[in-house]
Image: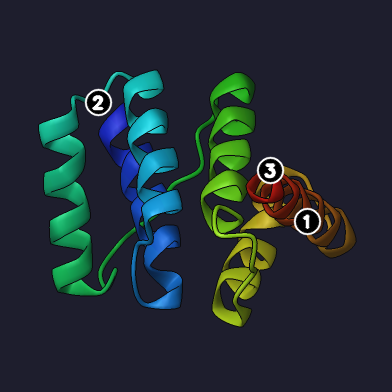
Amino acid sequence: MDATERFQVLAAAALMDGSVGSQELEILLKAAQEMGVIKATAEQILDETQRSKGKGLKARIPTDPRQRATLFRSLVDVVAADGVIDGKELKLVQRLGPSFGLNELEVEDLLRGAASAKRAQRKR
C-alpha cells in the first residue's frame, strides 16, 4: 500500500461526517506530509473523495506493522480532530479496528482519548 492509498483512507474517514473542517484539514495535510504525499496531490485526493463521497474506495490495510500502526493513529487523529466523534466516524473506525488488531472497546477508548485531548487543547 503506497502513501497515496493510505492518504485516501484518511480522506474518506475525514468525510464521514459530511465535510472536512479546518482542524481535520490541518491534521490531514500534516499526515500527508509525513507520508510523503505532496500538498497538491493531497488536495486533489480530498477533492476527488469529496466528489465521490468516498464511494468505491477499496481500503487495504498495510501489511507492514509500522505503517499499519501509523495509519490507524492518523485515522484516529483525523476523526477526533474537531473534538467530536460522529456516529458514522465511530462506526467506520470500529469496523476497521479488528483489521488493525484492536477490539471495539480499544477503538472507543482511543477515540475518546483523542477527542478529549483535542477539546482540552482548544481550551488552552
The residues tagged by marks 3 and 1 sit, at their Cα atoms, a distance apart of 21 Å
The type of residue carrying mark 1 is Val
Residue placed under numbered mark 3 in the picture: 121
Residue depicted at 13% across the width and 35% down the height: 41
Q: Between disc 3 and disc 1, whose residue precedes?
A: 1
Horizontal side of residue 104 vs 76, given as left or right: right
Residue placed under numbered mark 1 in the picture: 107
The x, y position of residue 108, in whole percent, is 81, 62
The residues tagged by marks 2 and 1 sit, at their Cα atoms, a distance apart of 26 Å
Disc 1 is placed on an element classified as helix
Q: Callout 3 environment at 10 Å: few (<14), some (14 to 19), or many (20+)?
A: few
Q: Between disc 3 and disc 2, whose residue precedes?
A: 2
**Do labels 2 and 1 touch, CB within 8 Å?**
no
Location of residue 2 (image quadrant): top left
Horizontal side of residue 72 vs 107, given as left or right: left
Q: Callout 1 environment at 10 Å: few (<14), some (14 to 19), or many (20+)?
A: many
The type of residue carrying mark 2 is Val
Quadrant including the N terminus: top left
Disc 2 is placed on an element classified as loop
Location of residue 58 (image quadrant): bottom left
The type of residue carrying mark 3 is Gln
The x, y position of residue 48, in whole percent, is 13, 59
Residue depicted at 38% across the width and 41% down the height: 26
Image mark for residue 74 = none
Q: Nearer the viewer, mark 3 or mark 1?
A: 3
Horizontal side of residue 18 vs 51, given as left or right: right
Image mark for residue 37 = 2
Q: Is residue 1 above or below residue 109?
A: above
Taking the image as drawn, is residue 54 in sight? yes
Horizontal side of residue 95 vs 17, given as left or right: right
Taking the image as drawn, is residue 1 in sight? no
